[in-house]
Amino acid sequence: MAVNNAMTADFLRSAYGGESMAHMRYLIWADAAEKEKLPKISRLFKAISYAEWTHARNHFVVLKDKVGDNTVPAGAVFGLTNTVENLQGALNGELHEIEQMYPVYLETARFQNEKEAERSFHYAVEAEKQHAELFKKAQKAAKEGNDISSEKFYICPICGHTVENEAPGQCPICGAKKELFKEF
């Protein structure tokens, strides 16, 4: 089913742009954390980078029938300082998506009866809530000069659901089986 409404298509493009930039930004910040000898925070950034890639892919796929060049306006956090400040930038971006961006995009998709876009936005906002909590915890540890305790992170490749230490038997957001989760 194609996206029929121009506003929902624009929101998908904007979300794709923002998630794509978050994906790359988190990989850059992962390298910075590694250099600061915070390997577990580095792993967290890499894991959530994959979740952001998953969101970007989902938004892109929903737009499958909208072929052509488009200018994509998307907000983004810029800067490369230290891990504490990078985590604040990550947290600010996630909170923007949770509190402002995705609620508007999701309600618009519902109003315009764009089911695929609604699903894609829903998956993203639910995962972003987890990301914000993980970034808060990581920032608290980094402010104290410590790394986080989590050894592994698991990401659902369908919706971006993100968990520490062990994948659930089934994804609570999209229903994907444990075996599909990607380990970081």
Image (cartoon, helix red, strand yellow):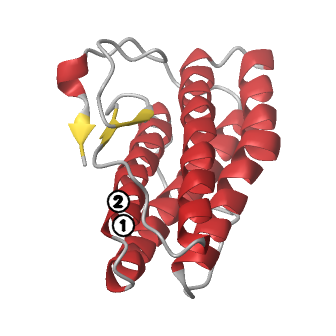
Relative to 183, does residue 167 appear above or below in the rendering? above
Q: Position of residue 145 (x, y in %)?
A: 52, 76
Residue at 63 percent across and 37 percent down: it is 129
Is 20 positioned to the left or the right of 151 in the image?
A: right
Residue at 63 percent across and 77 percent down: it is 85
Relative to 154, does residue 47 appear above or below in the rendering? below
According to the picture, the residue beneath numbered tag 2 turns out to be 46
Residue at 21 percent across and 25 percent down: it is 180
> Residue 144's image quarter?
bottom right
Residue 42's disc number: 1
9 or 110: nearer the viewer: 110
Tag 1: amino acid: Ser
Structural distance between the alpha carbons of marks 2 and 1: 6 Å
169 or 101: nearer the viewer: 169
Q: Are marks 2 and 1 in contact (CB under 8 Å)?
A: yes
Label 2: which secondary element: helix
Q: Position of residue 177 (x, y in %)?
A: 26, 14
Is 147 positioned to the left or the right of 105 in the image?
A: left
Crowding near the residue tagged with mark 1, few <14, some 14–19, many ≥20 C-alpha atoms within 10 Å? many
Relative to 102, does residue 138 appear above or below in the rendering? below
* Residue 16 visible, this orientation: yes
* Residue 13 visible, this orientation: no
91 or 97: nearer the viewer: 91
Residue at 70 percent across and 47 percent down: it is 97
Is 16 positioned to the left or the right of 51 in the image?
A: right
Residue 91's disc number: none
